[in-house]
Image: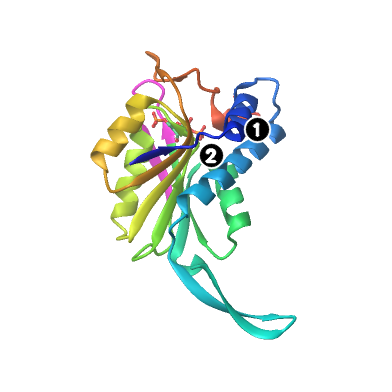
Amino acid sequence: MVYELSNPVTKTLIMHLRDQSSDALRFRHTVMELTKQLMYEALKEPVLTQKSITTWRGKESYEVIDEDNIVVATVLRAGMPMLDSAVDLLPGVSAGFLAMKRDETTHKSVLYYDRLPDCKGKTVILVDPMVATGGSMMDAIELIKGREPLKIITLNIIGSPEGLEKVSKAYPEVDIYIAQIDERLNSDKFIIPGLGDAGDRSYNTV
Ligand code: PRP
């Protein structure tokens, strides 16, 4: 199932990502803000646990998200600011790293680094800002599925209807939270209107 954020703050932040005058710092911070919005949405019905803390009244127990059972996995490079944002918000989760590069000729993604923690029985939140053809997401989901997680959730900033349909048809059990669904893919498999290459925009590389 695909869930799109629809609030005006989201739209305003997306405009800053499209704006080519937003520098790398602004771009990353905007991605991080949007990631927090996506986290609030995606974790509406999380597994809760009790945590004992010392308050001004003494020892008390409160309901909190069970961070020990959450893995946030990122796809390098563009997913890095999203991972930073997620682990800032919930520092008890564990982080996983996948590196994929989309071959701009074949438009297929190639995995070249895999450093996922134990995912068995856990909720894995996969973060990648862009869903163009959906190929990278599908490869990442397939790899994570092999690690026997309880559930997979994806957080994405911007995507094409074509890519999202492909992923959600192939993996109906995966919940996809996305800030903005754009119009279409062009013949070079770029998202239109899109925002350029999120990895390049985040880190000033070309
Ligand atoms: C981008 C993006 C996704 C992928 C989306 O990464 O971050 O991982 O492309 O394309 P797809 O849906 O067609 O697979 P890119 O390959 O540009 O690498 P980068 O993060 O290093 O910029």
* Disc number for residue 102: none
Answer with left or right where residue 92 lies relative to residue 190: right
Q: Considering the numbered disc 2 on the image, is that residue within a helix, a strand or a loop?
A: loop
Where is the C terminus found, in terms of image quarters? top right
Q: Nearer the viewer, mark 2 or mark 1?
A: 1
Determine the secondary structure under disc 1.
helix
> Which numbered marker is on residue 27?
1
Crowd class of label 2 (few under 14; some 14 to 19; many from 20; radius 10 Å): some
Name the residue furthest right.
Answer: 56
Does residue 120 show up? yes
Residue at 50% across, 17% down: 193
Closer-to-camera residue (62/163): 62
> Start and end of the magenta stretch?
101-114
Q: Residue at x 56, y 44 (%)?
A: 37
Rendered view: 68 above or below 83: below
Say what amino acid the circle numbered 2 marks.
Arg
Give, as a three-letter code, the residue at label 1: Phe
Q: Nearer the viewer, residue 36 or 144?
A: 36
**Viewer can see residue 205:** no
Q: Is residue 110 magenta?
A: yes
Which residue in the structure is indicated by mark 2?
77
Locate residue 67, reporting x and y percent.
51, 66
Extreme residue toward the bottom, this view: 58
Q: Which color mode does the image show? A: rainbow
